[in-house]
Image (cartoon, rainbow, N blue to C red):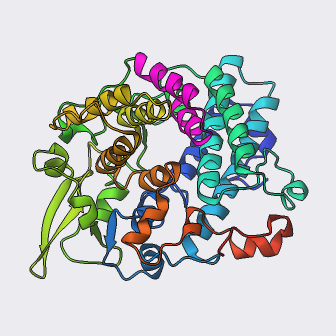
Amino acid sequence: MPNDRIDHSEVYKDIATTKAALNNLYLDFATSAIFNKSNTGASFNLSLFTDELDYYGTNTSGKDMHENNISDIHSNTTAWWNNSYQNIYVINAFIQGVESSAYLEANLKKQLLGEAYTLRALYYHYLTILYGDVPHTTSTDYNFNKSLKRLSHQEVLLKIEENLTTAIDLLDYSYRDPNKFYINKSIALVVLLENYIAQKKYTKAENVARLILDQKLYSIEDNLSKTFKKDSKSTIWQIAPRFATDITSEASLYLFSNFTVNSSTLTNNLMILFEDKDKRKEQWLRKIKINNQEFYQVYKYQNQTNNTDEYSIFYRIEQVYFQLAYSLYMQDDIKQATETLNIVRQKRGLDDLPLAFSKEEFLTNYLNESQKEFFTENARRFIDLKTTNKLDDLKMIKPNFKPYHNLLPIPYRQLEINKNLLPNNPGY
């Protein structure tokens, strides 16, 4: 072998090289086409695609996303698919290597496998949410993988559930790192919570949400300025920076003094939802003036130089409260669902919502509250609207939005390579 390489089978004979291989999976995740927090990731692009961000940049892919003008050759949606399956392949290879290793201690194996299973589940979860019926494989056999067929999204969600229940059994609630960079049981449970909601298993979703909250490992920060700091009590999982003082991708992307290639600001539709006394309006938004016009920037991450106290947060406890509320709503317990939303509202300086909502009134308020809380985070707005069958409402403010935009197109090149993926999703 070359001096800078090691044979695959040798990696899993040593704790250090095995952990290094796992660290590479995390690096792949943080920089992946779909999960990165820069201008090419799903967080930013699906905020453009829905009704959270207006686009003032000049990048064609961003314009197309903002104008709902996507096709099966769109650079971002193609990269999300291609890169996700590339990374899943590497995860599959890691899992096979750890499982077959006779050199690793049993408890260490459990931890490493639990983390890898959860990472794989996350990729598949987002792939099936965004693309619908997708291939699912745990194999590293090229000849097998090159002719995979798409499974129904229900089948994929079931496989994700199986993966996560295995991971949860292998993991515990402690973190391998005090900065919460590595996956623990709580993180696997949050992904399972999302999975149960996607499967419409609302009683199970409620039980998982309550299990996470009952651990009392996380709490909503009283001071909103601390929510997106690295030591926030609400953080369940955050992403390590490449270098210690790197600014977050979010700060780099959303903060500017003049319009640049990827500039975006909050839409009026989102801004009018914020009440004057909403602390999020003061802490998480920044007013700027460009060409004598006022705009509001995303200001969740604020350090633009010498960053020492911000990491990109992937999951925080507020999401669990919202998904518990939605699970209760889908079981017709509107009163308790509203009380759960009010827990977050109180922390944001707002009065309680009335407990006598109709189902439709609750859903409207739920979507508004969720958007104010999670704007530009992990495609939450797209997922919420899709989950509640409200995506089509976007056509009232986005004239190019079509009903088939609830799914993204399978990349054209992949359909050419593997005819088993045909036909493409409707409309493409």
User: Residue reaching furthest right?
Assistant: 143
Residue 312 x/y as whole percent:
37, 47
- Say whether residue 95 is visible: yes
**Residue depicted at 85% across the width and 61% down the height:** 146
Which residue range is magenta in the image?
A: 189-214
Whether 3 is among the magenta residues is no
Residue 107 x/y as whole percent:
66, 18
Above or below, 408 relative to 361: below
In this rendered view, identify the residue nearer to me: 380 or 87: 380
**Residue depicted at 26% across the width and 44% down the height:** 308
In the displayed structure image, the side of residue 379 where residue 280 appears, left or right: left
In the displayed structure image, the side of residue 329 where residue 89 appears, left or right: right
Looking at the rendering, which quadrant does residue 224 occupy? top left
Instruction: Quarter of the image for the C terminus: give it.
Output: bottom right
**Residue depicted at 15% across the width and 43% down the height:** 279
- Say whether residue 20 is visible: no
Above or below, 258 relative to 219: below
Most common secondary structure along the magenta stretch: helix
